Structure formats: structure tokens, C-alpha cells
Image (tube, rainbow, N blue to C red):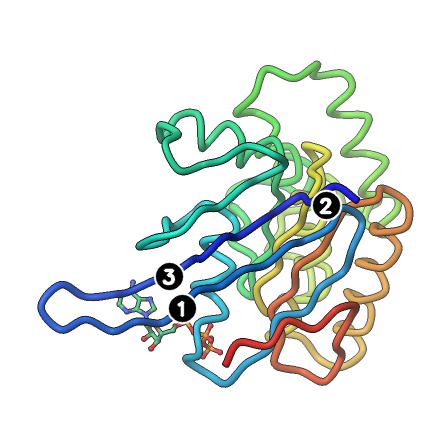
Amino acid sequence: MHNVIELIGVNKTYGTRVKSQILHDINLEIEEHSINSVVGASGSGKTTLLNIMGTLDRPTSGEVIIDGANTKNMTQRKLAKLRNQAIGFIFQFHFLLQEFNVFDNVLMPSQIQRNNQFEVKERANHLLDMLGLYKYRRSNVLDLSGGQQQRVAIARSLINNPKIILADEPTGNLDLHSSEDVYNIFEQVNKEYGVAFVIVTHDKHLAGRVIKIP
Ligand SMILES: Nc1ncnc2c1ncn2[C@@H]1O[C@H](COP(=O)(O)OP(=O)(O)OP(=O)(O)O)[C@@H](O)[C@H]1O
């Protein structure tokens, strides 16, 4: 089985004068097509771990391998390209662009690469259709409910056809019904597109393998 993410001996320490070690010698493999939930007490380092997996933050020591590529000595530019191609991100607060409509928000990550625009737009339409948002594609994102906005964020995370989606408390801001909706979509996307998921969660809906941070 191919690993889409591999962490080898990862440590993370914050602070310069007063040091605080958050992650201790983490060794982890995320297999392609797998679903994984990250759990742990508040402040235990779940978001820190996810940010390191997503190359948004670098470990103090240890190695992060994304889809077979060791990121240790990569330039910021190369890292940004790899991240944009391989990884989709979903956050608790979706960070949609308020001045853009639904369709343009979904297209956003694809604009960084010179992808075939026709294919990208077709894919955006397909994703919006799958997520029940096609009729809202010209609406401003502020006119949508919280659950609908999170579905726009899910479509956006999938636009570059990533191998992995990293989701940080994706249902933290949603009611029970919308939360279940989001988890059902994750399962559907995992089945249909083979995307691996790593989900940081506080709620009881634990999907797939559970990674516990001490
Ligand atoms: N940039 C930073 N600089 C200094 N300390 C930080 C930084 N980011 C996080 N921390 C600290 O690292 C610890 C872990 O934070 P993190 O957000 O990863 O935990 P978490 O498990 O995701 O928490 P929660 O469940 O409350 O969201 C916390 O004590 C936090 O204050």
C-alpha cells in the first residue's frame, strides 16, 4: 500500500526563550484511500500535527514525506506547488472569499496552477452537483447556510484532485444534521475519488482509523 503522508520522528517545539514541546517523536503513515480521525485533549497538538502534515508548518526535527517526496530540503516555492497539487484543506471556519460567488470560490485553488480551464470548470460543476449546490453556483457565499458554506469548502478542497484531504474540526461550527451531512460526503468522496482523509475532531463521530495524541 502506498503512503500519501509519512511522518518520521517528528518533534515540534514552540517558543524561543521558554520552550514548550508539543509533539514528541511522532511516527505515522497515512495510507492512500484511508480515513483517519485525530483525537486528543484540547491543546494536545492536533492542529499542530495537521499543519505539519499539510506542510503549512515545519517540524522542529523529523521528516515529512508527501506522496513519496521528502519535504525536508524543499524550497518554499516547491513546497507550495506540492501542497497545492496533493493536499486539500478544510477548516472549521471555512475561509471562503466573501466577495466571490460559490463557483469562483470553488475554482480558487485551481487558479494557482495553469490547469486546463475547461476541465477545471467541468469539474467544479460536477462537484457542485454532487454536493447539492449547483443551483447556488452564482450565489454569494454569504447567502448560504453554515452547512452549505462548508459544502462549498469541501468542493473547493477537491478542485485540484488531491490525494489527501486534511480537515481541522470541519463540523465544529455545525449542528448535528449538517455534521452528519459532512461526514456522509467525506465517505462518498473517499469511495468515489479514492481521496484519503485525516480529520481532527472533538465530536463523537470518529471515522476510520483513530490517531490519538497523548
Ligand atoms: N504558533 C504557536 N506559537 C506558540 N504556541 C503555539 C502555537 N500554536 C499552538 N501553540 C500551542 O501549542 C499547543 C497545541 O496547540 P494546538 O492548537 O495544536 O492544539 P489542539 O489539540 O488542536 O487544541 P484544540 O483542540 O483546543 O483546538 C497549545 O498549547 C497552543 O497554545
Instruction: Indicate left or right for 163 with 213 as reference.
Output: right
* Mark 3 to mark 2 CA distance (whole Å): 32 Å
The image quarter containing residue 60 is bottom left
Q: Earlier in the sequence, mark 1 or mark 3?
A: 3
* Mark 1 to mark 2 CA distance (whole Å): 31 Å
Q: Earlier in the sequence, mark 3 or mark 2?
A: 3
Instruction: Indicate left or right for 25 with 194 as reference.
Output: left
Above or below residue 100? Residue 96 is: below
Q: Amino acid at mark 3?
A: Asn
Closer-to-camera residue (178/115):
115
Above or below residue 170? Residue 76 is: above
- The structure residue drawn at horizontal position 70% and vertical position 16%, both measured from the top left corner, is 117
The image quarter containing residue 86 is top right
Q: What is the number of the mark on residue 11?
A: 3
Horizontal and vertical percent position of residue 9: 45, 57
Whether residues under marks 1 and 3 lie with C-beta atoms below 8 angstroms apart, the answer is: yes
Q: Which residue is mark 1?
A: 23
Q: What is the number of the mark on residue 155?
A: 2
Secondary structure under tag 1 reads: strand
Whether residues under marks 1 and 2 lie with C-beta atoms below 8 angstroms apart, the answer is: no
Mark 2 crowd level (few <14, some 14–19, many ≥20, 10 Å Cα) = many
Eye-nearest disc, 1 or 2: 1
Q: Amino acid at mark 2?
A: Ala
Horizontal and vertical percent position of residue 89: 59, 50
In what quadrant does ligand 1 lie? Answer: bottom left
